[in-house]
Image (cartoon, grey):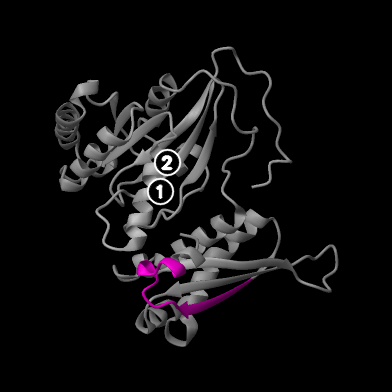
Amino acid sequence: MNTEAFTFRTDYPEDFRSGFLSFVGRPNVGKSTLTNALVGQKVAITSNKPQTTRHTIRGIMHLEKAQIVLVDTPGLHRPRTLLGQRLNDLVAETLADVDVIAFCIPANEKIGPGDRFIAEHLANLTQAPVIAVVTKIDTVKKPVVAEQLMAVHALGEEILGERGGFADIVPVSAVTDEQLNALTDVIIERLPVSPPLYPEGEISDESKTKMIAEIIREAALEGVREELPHSLAVVVDEIVPREDRPEDKPLLDVRVHLFVERSSQKGIIIGKGGSRLKEIGSVARPQIREILGSPIYLDLHVKIAKDWQRDPKQLDRLGF
């Protein structure tokens, strides 16, 4: 994102804190929704399909006494493909560079092997303080939340006992904004004293092309089969001004390819008579127009890249 329109704050107090926070957790535990709620604007896709976040996305919170840079990573999981392994490697690299880690565990699911797998990884990968965030508390009754909080505490004592368990445990709901201020305070306490790292007004350092690709992928994932999320990649080929347009009526041509692994998946994305692809365009177009600040023509094409999740060359070409 272009930072030339923004300026760095110069009136920050001496005890101003600034640093990086990474959300980790199993796929689909609410990390992206929480990132968007804290930033106050959409910077991460929030499909209800597992493993939808493919890149680390930084959302930036500008507060009176702090600046929190939120790093939303893919969900840590046991990898079954080369793509899965690369996503896990991306998480490990990110955790090595952050100041605080927020381990998200949903209130509406019992702690399972996946949560233990992540907790064990955190114990080995980082010395940063780990805050446990119990998400989705709006989906269950208070006694269930209390029970989950005790279970999370026990998990921290068992696996992170050498460092005193979790640095804190905070129940939240990103949907109803419950406890978000409390979570913010807990995070700030553990950030280093530092000047702001990003200019005022900037909400993400993600490139516009990546944000556009994520928006289109989110639109494509809504209402499709479970198999498709892992097989779908989106590449923005170019964003160019339409020639011969008057200055007061600009138009940007946004040309995009959606890649799937099989012809049956291509049919799902396109839909009968192109209906599904048109719907994807209708959902994504206004969001892309807002990002680019201009009317757009969105040109979507679907291609097959057979078994791309397992092919190193294709992964490289698709940006993984």
Instruction: For the C terminus, give its image quadrant.
Output: bottom left
Which amino acid lies under the numbered mark 2 shown in the image of this protein? Answer: Thr
Which residue is situated farthest in the bottom direction here? 273
Q: Position of residue 56 (x, y in %)?
A: 46, 47
Residue 311 falls within the magenta-colored stretch: yes
Residue sitting at x 33%, y 58%: 84
The numbered disc on residue 257 is none
The answer to whether residue 291 is above or below residue 36 is: below
The answer to whether residue 269 is above or below residue 291 is: below
Q: Position of residue 202 (x, y in %)?
A: 62, 39
The residue stretch that appears in magenta? 298-314
Check contact, mark 2 vs mark 1: CB within 8 A. Answer: yes
Indicate the secondary structure of the residue bearing disc 2. Answer: helix
Residue sitting at x 38%, y 45%: 91
Residue sitting at x 55%, y 20%: 194
The numbered disc on residue 94 is 2
Is residue 122 or residue 21 the one in the foreground?
122
